[in-house]
Image (cartoon, rainbow, N blue to C red):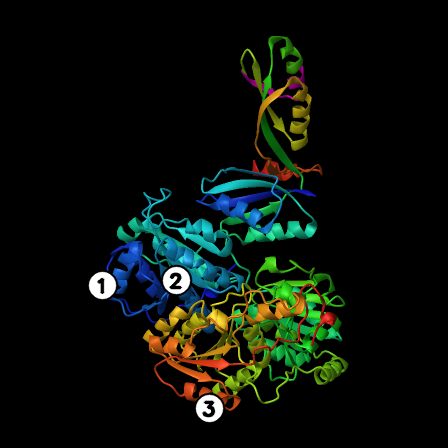
Amino acid sequence: MRHTISLLVENKFGVLARISNLFSGKGYNLDSICVGETETPELSRMTIMTSGDDMVIEQIIKQLNRLINVIKVTDLTFDEHVNRELALIKLSCTASMRNSIIQIVEIFQAKIVDISPRTLTIEVTGGHKKVEACINMLQPFGIREIARTGTTALKREYSGSSPDWSAARASA
Amino acid sequence: MPTVKDQKPKRKKRPEINPLLDKKVLTGSEVMIRSLIEEDVDFIFGYPGGVVIPVFDKIYNVSRPKLVLCRHEQGAQHMADGYARASGRPGVCLVTSGPAATNLVTGIATSYMDSIPVVHFTGQVATTAIGNDAFQEVDIIGITRPITKHSYLVRNVEDLAATIKEAFYIATTGRPGPVLIDMPKDVLLSECEFEYPEEADMPGYKPTRHGHVQQIKKAAEAMAGARRPVFYVGGGAVLSDCSQELTKIARKAKIPVTTTLLGLGAFPENDPLSLGMLGMHGTWYSNMAVNEADLVIAVGSRYDDRVTGKVDAFAAKAGHIHIDVDPASISKNIKVDYPIVGDCRSVLQKMLPMVKKSDTAEWLKLIGHWKESHPLKYDDDGTVIKPQYVIEKIHEVCGDDTVVVSDVGQHQMWTALHYNFVKPRTHITSGGLGTMGFGFPAAIGAALSGPKGKVVAIVGDGGFQMTCQEVATAVSQRLEVIVCILNNGFLGMVRQWQELFFGKRYSHTCLEYTNPDFVKLVEAYGAKGLRVTKREDVVPTLREAAGTRNMPVFIDFRTYRHENVFPMIPPGKMATDIIE
């Protein structure tokens, strides 16, 4: 099963290498890894997409926790969370094709970020499946190049049950 | 969360600081030595070289820590490792960059597999040269990343003292392990104000020390309810020094105890509840006990493949309690019913008052019957020197307090089976990695740690030759180490496998015609060499060695060549497949 694991790590030299080493050394799957600074410059957040049975995932989380530079490990898979991926897609595109491409771009709420007489570059963000779907729809037009980020994710605070607005008001 | 109290109690008296180092502004090299003094380090095992000359220049003036000059960096690492295993204090290693650093690798992996606290200092080329393929440059941080608990490249001299503090804290707490500090040359030469931090505080490192009380209670209840319980005790029990607690609980609850190779000594083997060693070359009755048990209580062990054999068949009828300081060891190979994360000693201390006597009379009777019908034995017609016989006599001559360091191979298993260890930290061996060449240098480290008894290394003729240049170190330190070479002219363990599983095709395992004359070899270094070819000379020669002062003694025992290690569970098989 595919799991989304969120890590809070120290923003230090070699941390990414330690984490990727762990995955390669122990033979765990690593589908994607996405890293960036957080609100605190000393810390980075990493989102890892991986897969395995329950025992493997449990080991992955425990092994990540063992790393000295890893501060917090959260498996977001079973929590409500927002996840996003970004893809840049460069298409072969002549003037005559533009309109049909723009239609697809609008459906996916994507953006055109670069244009030339023979190409068009599209930026699409969303969940992993949406980005896949967008790429599939654009495939027939002739994709020249794709650059994709991994998935990045944050836990949702409001998960659908009745929120405690009074507490929110009081804190405001 | 560890509090300051959990960290090792500081020695009351302020360590004596050499006047040359007792100043406010220090160079990186001086910071390093000062920090080691603050950590109360008494020995550094090392070898000089290009970029660490500044450190060796400072060591020149200092009497403590004392530098022990090895003859190969791998030897230095094994010595630091043996020192740590025998004493419970972290070992320290100092070598230069490049080839010296890579020479440590086998040793670091050895310490990592057996969770031994060793802090390694390696030199590195100047920060400006890093990455340029400079002379003797190697990315040792990258090379050792999978075999260290943590590692540091120090880029600013201001960070050096805090890094050393953290390194010692990481190495010795939680599940212990090796830590490496890489020190570029310019960092060793630049200056800063010295201040040694009181404690290490890392946001991502908070080892759990105390087990969860409710879990411990549940485990104690399960133990009271079990009819066929058995303790399965590993190296973690030795590392956490919990033998006393373990022994009390086992005796109070009347639960038999089997140990792994690294757990030997954690429970006295002369106790009727002891089943000896478990696993591939374990005793018949220990393997059968675990096979028939209804509850396995794992203490500081990790369900290693040499213990379990075929994992699905291991203790298949049993529930599992697993006490370990490392959460990642729990439910790694076998799903555990009562996981308890915490230091073994702390957990067992809490468990002791909760333990009730289990109703194990029937169980112990059955085990007693097994011990009689399938005893640990070897054939001995009294004409040849059987290796097992030598090992029994070593115990007889040298006594219970002797620290026995074995190398890797057949003799290691015979030592584990036939020595009868009764005290913790008296058995040292490379269990996880199985590093040939470990035994002799580790014995040097153990001897320097000042153990109560003698230090005896039991090695094979193959393994000894991997690190025999350290005879020079043992001679220079005037160590009274006794090295027993069980010389059968074979790489015996591999030969045994070839005999049993490869149709007696002895490919490259016979050393007989190319082995050196070990007596002459050690005499060339200035050590004492003795040879035993007759059975009746075994004891008198051991006595002579035990009486020799101020120098190491090496005994070349010409043992029976074709002896095999039994019992044996073939790899990947289960307890009931055991060959006696």
Label 2: chain letter: B
The residue singled out by tag 2 in the image is B73
Residue pictured at 32% horizontal, 74% vertical: B476
* x, y percent for residue B553: 40, 81
**Position of residue B256 in the picture relative to residue B522 (left or right):** right
The residue singled out by tag 3 in the image is B540
Sequence order check, earlier mark of 1 and 2: 1
Sequence order check, earlier mark of 3 and 1: 1
Distance between mark 1 and mark 2 Cα atoms: 28 Å
Task: Give the image quarter of residue B38.
Answer: bottom left
Q: Residues within 10 Å of mark 3 (few under 14, many from 20)?
A: few
Q: Which residues are magenta?
A: A103-114
Tally the numbered discs: 3
The residue singled out by tag 1 in the image is B20
Label 3: chain letter: B
* x, y percent for residue B204: 50, 51
Which structural element holds mark 3?
helix
> What amino acid is at disc 3?
Pro
Front residue (pair B578, B160): B578
Is there any visible trace of residue B41 in the rendered image? no
Which structural element holds mark 2?
helix
